[in-house]
Amino acid sequence: MQPFPAFLKKLPKAALRRIGNTIDLIDYAIKIRLYKKLLGDRQESERQSLLIISGNGMNVVWAQIWALLSLPVRMQGYTGYVLTNRRQRTLNGYFRLMGLRLIHLDDYPLSADIPPAIREATASATDIESFRTIHYQSAPVGQIALSTYSRNFGTGLIDFSDPKVTTYIRQWIGRVCHCMDLAQRIFAERRVDMLFVTEVFMEEYGAFYYAALNAKLNIVRFAGTVRDDAFIMQHLSKENDRIHHSSLDKTTWEKIQRRSDDAAMEAELAANFMDRYGDKWHRSKRGHPNTQMPGVEQAKAQLGITPGRKVAVIYSHILYDTLFFFGTDLFKDYSEWLVETARAAIANPHIDWLIKVHPSNLWRGEMDTLLKGRFEEERLLQNALGALPPHVRIVGADTKINPYTWFQLADYGITVRGTSGLEMAAFGKTVITAGTGRYEGNGFTVDPANASEYLNILRRLHELAPPSREQTRLAKRYAHAIFVLKPYTLSSLTPRRRFGCKTVYLSDDLIYIPTGLRGNSLPKDLEKFGQWAINPADRDLLADI
């Protein structure tokens, strides 16, 4: 990363950002020329196409990644299209460098009027449950609209008594329905066979995703990881629609369980934990900046835990992020789960309960804008429960105790489906889940069937026996697959800080520039991705299996 020259630093930040974006784009353009030559004079197919869903507000990093990863697919005869809009000039610039054809969403008039078939249902919907039941062409458009509201307003609390709120949700239901109709039209006109997606459950992204499910297209979903050089890819279909990206398909898990390299696996997993909670990767350390790893007893003393007391950590989720998509929940949303979990903790004074605010609050932009500098979890619990008793405490996202230490000091982990639950299980701790779609049901977590059973377990949590050695072995095996095998290293892209950026804070602060190409053939990482991408039966792309 090069700093801005001194004479430029007097310009407004927005102008500096535009200059930096242009410099990064030029760097990318220079490096990608040799990759584009691999396409040669291939005739693009009239029979099958790849459509990249880069809708409104997409991060620049995905344009950098997708532009290159479209190459091994197009080399197999696919025509490459991108769904974008005209305002996204920077992203569109990256796509044009690879000769991808742009479809501008803003060229299509989209109505927010609700189709007649579901107008009656939306008119009578007055709460979260009634909106959640609204479907259009088998797509959960009501849930997508609720998720859109929560993400855009940075809140997990929806006030249905406010006419502006219900109007906003109803308008998005209509827009999602119309986008589904548009998606079907575009799929047919462009002979779309494959999709690249990352967002799948809000705004127009949800519409194109569910239209693709209905059309039985080959859907490749991408997700970031805490590693700077690796990403997660999975094939989605109606059979695994609600599965979290950091989970394993049943067939993949069966293969992994047959492996006998426990010693090597445990060593790799231990090293991975230290890398993720150390300073190796920009993306991981932004969630625990300036933290230390004190010993367990020292950390307990800092937290005011009485010696000999067992500790349960309630790992709060981002209350408004990707609501309703992953699996099914025992409670109506993350907010209700957090309140009822805290209420059960209050009723069990045999344990010290620590409510840990999600570390993503540290770097997500909503903290200083929509949330006015205060964690929503704090406001929610204070309004619902008032002052908490001494054995139940909130620990902010800015705690100076590193997450790695938390896994060691706690006896119990409580989550809906958070990453911390899998991590704690790998440390041999008791984990209670309140939702599906991730790692539950694989023999190493306690998975209540309903909310009543869940709350009863929390009230007698101190009576539960710790996991067996076999359960911990299974948890370690699963964690190794998720943290070591599933992040796929893209060696053909070099991560670096964007021009003018000193610290990686936001998603686009770390960008990806093509690595120098040697020879006239696809690099191994792109070749393997391309072979996997066209085979939707192979659900998980793993680094080594």
Image (spheres, grey):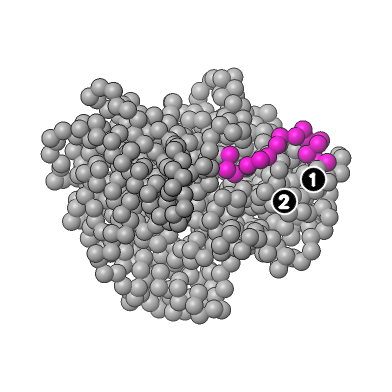
Q: CA distance from mark 1 to mark 2?
A: 9 Å
Q: Which residue is mark 2?
A: 395
Q: Residue at x 52, y 65 (%)?
A: 153
Q: Is residue 384 left or right of residue 170?
A: right
| Cβ atoms at labels 1 and 2 below 8 Å apart | yes
Q: Which residue is mark 1?
A: 303
**Magenta segment includes 521:** no
Q: Residue at x 70, y 46 (%)?
A: 399
- Percent from the top left, x then y, of residue 312? 74, 46
Decide if residue 474 is in sight here.
Answer: no
Q: Residue at x 29, y 51 (%)?
A: 92
Q: Secondary structure at mark 2?
A: strand
Q: Quarter holding the C terminus?
A: top left
Task: Indicate whether 455 appears above or below 94.
Answer: below
Q: Is residue 308 left or right of residue 543?
A: right
Q: Secondary structure at mark 1?
A: helix
* Amino acid type of the residue that numbered disc 2 sits on in the rendered structure: Val
- Percent from the top left, x then y, of residue 529? 34, 33
